[in-house]
Structure formats: C-alpha cells, structure tokens
Image: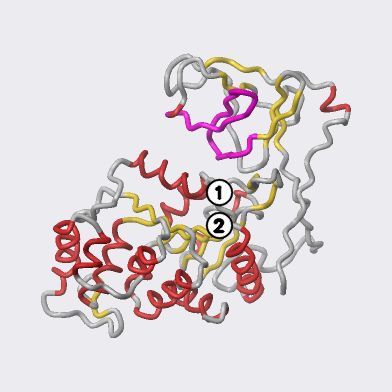
Amino acid sequence: MSLELRKYYPPNFDDEMFASSKDAKLKPAPKDGVAPENYHALSIFPEYFRVEGKWLLAEESRMDCVAVYEDGKILVKEFRNLKKGELVATGRTEDGSEGIYVHSTGFREKKAESDVFAFRQNRSRETAFSIDYDELYDILNYDRDHGKIVWVMGPAFAFDHDARNAFSKLIEAGYVDAVLAGNALATHDLEGAYKKTALGQDIYTQKSQPMGHYNHLDTINRVRYYGSIAEFIKQEKIDNGIIYNLEKKNVPYVLAGSIRDDGPLPPVFGDVYTAQDRMRDQIRDATTVICMATMLHTIATGNMTPSYRVLKDGTVRQVYFYCVDISEFTVNKLSDRGSLSAKGIVTNVQDFICTVSKGLGL
C-alpha cells in the first residue's frame, strides 16, 4: 500500500449563502481570562470567520477554545490566556449566517454503504485490525519525511523488555518527533536501564527482585542528585531505553506531572497549565498522533488536536489520530471526535509497539 493524502476542498465562498452572510460579531473580552457572553467555542474541524467581508480560516485550532481576531488573522486561545479587550468572535450558529462557518466535510470522506442492520460496527477486541496496521505503516513512512509524528505514552512500555527495545528502534529510525508522557514512563524506563527492573520487577522475567520496591525511588533520587536526566545518563553510563534514545536523538519530550508522582524527575512539569502549554507546543504542528495506554493523556491530547493542519505553503491536510489501549472504553472515548481524527485499536500496547516495529522492518 502507499499513502495518498485526501485532498482538502475549502468552502466556495462565491456561493450565495456566504456572499449574503454578515460579518462575525467581535466583542472585547471583559476581563483577563474571561470571554464575552455568547462566545463561539471551536471544534476539531476547520472553521472560517467573516471579518470585514473576508473569510478567514483559524489555522491553529483547538476544541473548546475561542477565536480572537488580531492583525488580520484568527488566533485560537484558551480562556485562561485571554487578555482584557481582545476581540473574540461571538455567535452560536455554524452555517455561515452569522459570519461563522464550521467546515466538517472538507476532506470528503467516502462513506461505505451498509445495510440498516449489520454486525460489528463499533471498534472492540473482536475487530480485525490488519488493515489499520497496514495503513499505519504507510502513514508513518510518509510522515517521517513529510510531517511530524507525536507519541503519547503511558508507563506500560517501560515494564517490558521487548517493548522498550521496539520503541527505541522507532526513535533511532526517525519515526518519533516528540513524546508526551508523565513522570511514571520516564521513571520506570530509566529504572529499567539503571537497575534492569521496573517497579522492582525484572523487565524481562517479571520476577520481583530483593528490595526491588526501592529501585524506582533510588533512580529518581539519583537523577535528582545529578540535576538532570542528561547528566544522569552520562554519569551512570546509561546506554539503552526510551528516554536514553530520546536524549541521544535530541527528540523533545514533555513530562506532565500528577498528584500521585514520586520525586518527581527534574524535567516534570508540576504546574498542570504549564504542562498543557508545553504539550500544545508539540501538538500544534503534529500531523500524526498516536496515543497508547494512557486515558487521561489521551483525552488531553485529543482535546488539543484538530482534524486538520495548515502547512507552511498554505496547504490544508488531515491529521491522523490513533488511540491504542487494551480497554475498549478508553479507545471509544474519543470516537465521537470524528473518524478523521480518532481511530481506535484495541490491543495490548506492548504487543502493538512490537508489531509496528517489525512491520516497519526494524
């Protein structure tokens, strides 16, 4: 198979419905962090706003944010980042009649014909995912050269020898442009490199080691002693693992803190909104996002990932979004975000990453 990106079809603004539309109503934010009444909240789809007779696309969108008009462009801002006096688009219609148009069919997905009654229409553990893997290989090969691939990871990978190696191979081969995770993934991966355990269990045999429950704390404490993960890797001569390879290849990673964290490791962002900002810094130009075994990080990332991306040359292309988890509930949590932006695969993520690595010939 070879990947062919769907063409984007923008609205025809010469149509009467657009030509006769009013300009969007722009109202100043009454206070810092507060939107005016009747503000318009954005979706995952491309949205256009008519200002002074011209339709403008919100190029960097995010659901549940507001549109701000500034210097001839539509900016997308979280409520908390609004400044008093900024001009915010208002209106709850989406059909263009009030100068706001939500373009939900820009990529013209083909809808398969089906009977009114049919089995297995939802994604579950019984779904056959063979075609999804083949499509994913094509997407990864394409975006390694033409896009940005962001992985959102729970700590499950750090507990398995083969999974750690498989993801390390993906990093080495250039299939990883950023990683979003928490303290646990980095801690247990570094523990695996430092102590050959994860939460005290041998990462290959899964056998608990004597006094192994100290190992993750000893790892954190040692990293904190050196002041940084990079210095810990250097001084302790670490030569394997996910974090080691991210550091080696200078791939950015964002570790968002949690109230349950031990330590935490030095680079973990303890302020949730700072962590959200740093995550969005990586997501804003992502073209493929793969979330694996982390429900909260997946939901957070899903909320900040639109179904499209405006490239530097002005081209609008689709964003591929995958949610991989052994829990059907987690996988289907994002299914209502639209098929362009969320596709679920129900499987053990350790098996998944090993399959992907082998499927890419690594």
Residue appearing at x 38%, y 52% in the figure = 254
Q: Amino acid at mark 2?
A: Lys
Kindly check if marks 2 and 1 are in contact, taking CB atoms under 8 A apart as contact: yes
Given residues 338 and 308, the one toward you in this image is 308
Q: Which residues are magenta?
A: 58-80
104 in relation to 163, above or below: above
Residue tagged by mark 2?
Answer: 148
Given residues 263 and 124, the one toward you in this image is 263
* Mark pair 2, 1: CA separation: 7 Å
View extreme (left): residue:
211
Given residues 68 and 260, the one toward you in this image is 68
Residue appearing at x 57%, y 21% in the figure = 88
Residue tagged by mark 1?
Answer: 285
Q: Earlier in the sequence, mark 2 or mark 1?
A: 2
| Residue 166 numbered tag | none
Q: Amino acid at mark 1?
A: Asp
Neighbours of disc 1 within 10 Å: few (<14), some (14-19), many (20+): some
Residue appearing at x 67%, y 64% in the figure = 121
User: How far from the left and from the top, in percent, is residue 232?
Assistant: 21, 64
